[in-house]
Image: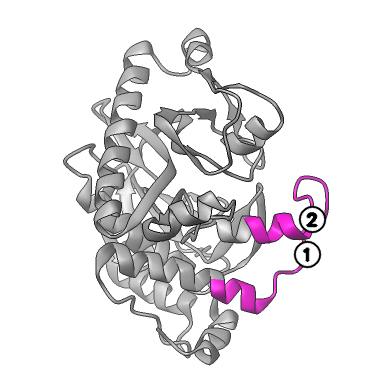
């Protein structure tokens, strides 16, 4: 990995926005900027923006590249489990995908009683709730305890700027957010993807704790997994070797995911009520290093950090102009 000094230099070269006026159908989301292209294609550009608690907090070096390349690994490894939206990769931050009709729910698969957000299992359980997303939980459980089996905890997809809202299976079917047939396939696909993820993570000494899936329908009405899969933004990964010892003494697991930053924020303020304090550069770099370490541990590849003297935004512009000359 690069020396810390190089990382500090890159703090000024993060990709904060990826709006290119030459491309049509621009849409800005929390982390990814996208474009609606012809022939049912969509361009996704992963920025370095960091979100948590439904807010944009900071820019994190290498983040967009890590997300794109980690998702690429998982899309390749799970293609036999569920079809995905990938068409091609144009840059280390850029992927061309099928433009799907996205389904209005997110499927979160969880295998541990953990989390720090309002829709996570542990805060609900800690408030005294014992029926979570339609699943009954006994008294006496501890934070970060393994569940008897993975469970699905769906949420509605928020409108722009809104919040995820917990929902249960009966409500999904009653409101016809998806059909009964679609719901059962979504649940089956999610559990199968999660099982494959846990299997491969375990081979690398990691625990895939929980994750979020988004799905859409392609032009033939087929269910396709979209957005990202098993990235440190959408999933929790713990170090397997130290999990049990840390759990036994009530310490947080060693993690390589977004929870590191969530816990830092919670230690500073109430993220749902208070202003978020400025996050020190040292904290953001430590956070970035966790994302890079996860990529390298999962894939067995060395993460190729970009040249800090070359603008990430300009590099992507050049890649887009080369790959999509009809727009430039």
- Relative horizontal placement of residue 74, taking residue 157 as reference (left or right): left
Relative side of 124 to 253, left or right: right
Rounded to the nearest whole Å, what is the CA distance between mark 2 and mark 1? Answer: 8 Å
**Image quadrant in which the N terminus is located:** bottom left
Viewer-proximal residue, 292 or 128?
128
Answer above or below: position of 160 versus 256.
Answer: above
Residue pictured at 54% horizontal, 29% vertical = 155
- Would you name the residue on which mark 1 appears? 277
- Mark 2 sits on what residue? 269
Q: Nearer the viewer, residue 35 or 290?
A: 290
In the image, farthest residue toward the left: 80
- The quarter of the picture where residue 124 lies is top right
Residue 104 x, y percent position in the rendering: 48, 28
- Above or below for 66 versus 206: below
Label 2 SS: loop
Q: Are marks 2 and 1 in contact (CB under 8 Å)?
A: yes
How packed mark 2 is, by other alpha carbons closer than 10 Å (few <14, some 14-19, many 20 or more), is: few
The answer to whether residue 101 is magenta is no
- Depicted 307 relative to depicted 107: above or below: below
Q: Which residues are magenta?
A: 263-286
Q: Can residue 232 be seen in the rendering of this structure?
A: no
Which of discs 2 and 1 lies nearer the camera? The answer is: 2
């Amino acid at each position: 990995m690069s020396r810390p000094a190089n990382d500090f230099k890159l703090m000024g070269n993060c990709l904060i926005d990826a709006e290119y006026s030459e491309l049509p159908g621009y849409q800005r989301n929390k982390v990814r900027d996208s474009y609606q292209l012809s022939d049912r294609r969509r361009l996704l550009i992963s920025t370095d923006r960091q979100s948590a608690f439904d807010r944009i907090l900071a820019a994190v070096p290498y983040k967009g590249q890590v997300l794109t390349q980690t998702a690429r690994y998982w899309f390749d490894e799970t293609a036999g489990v569920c079809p995905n939206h990938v068409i091609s990769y144009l840059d280390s931050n850029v992927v061309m995908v099928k433009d799907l009709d996205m389904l209005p729910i997110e499927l979160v698969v969880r295998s541990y009683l953990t989390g720090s957000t309002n829709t996570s299992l542990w805060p609900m359980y800690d408030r005294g709730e014992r029926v979570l997303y339609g699943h009954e939980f006994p008294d006496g459980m501890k934070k970060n305890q393994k569940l008897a089996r993975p469970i699905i905890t769906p949420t509605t997809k928020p409108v722009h700027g809104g919040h995820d809202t917990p929902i249960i299976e009966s409500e999904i079917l009653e409101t016809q957010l998806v059909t009964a047939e679609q719901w059962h396939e979504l649940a089956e696909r999610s559990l199968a993807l999660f099982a494959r993820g846990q299997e491969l993570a375990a081979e690398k000494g990691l625990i895939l704790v929980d994750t979020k899936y988004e799905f859409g329908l392609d032009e033939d009405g087929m269910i396709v997994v979209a957005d990202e899969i098993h990235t440190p933004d959408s999933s929790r990964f713990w170090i397997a070797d130290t999990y049990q010892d840390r759990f036994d003494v009530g310490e947080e697991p060693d993690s390589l995911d977004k929870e590191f930053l969530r816990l830092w924020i919670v230690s500073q303020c109430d993220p749902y009520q208070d202003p978020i304090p400025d996050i020190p550069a040292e904290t953001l770099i430590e956070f970035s290093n966790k994302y890079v370490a996860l990529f390298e541990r999962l894939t067995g590849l060395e993460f190729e950090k970009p040249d800090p003297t070359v603008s990430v935004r300009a590099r992507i512009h050049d890649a887009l102009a080369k790959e999509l000359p009809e727009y430039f």
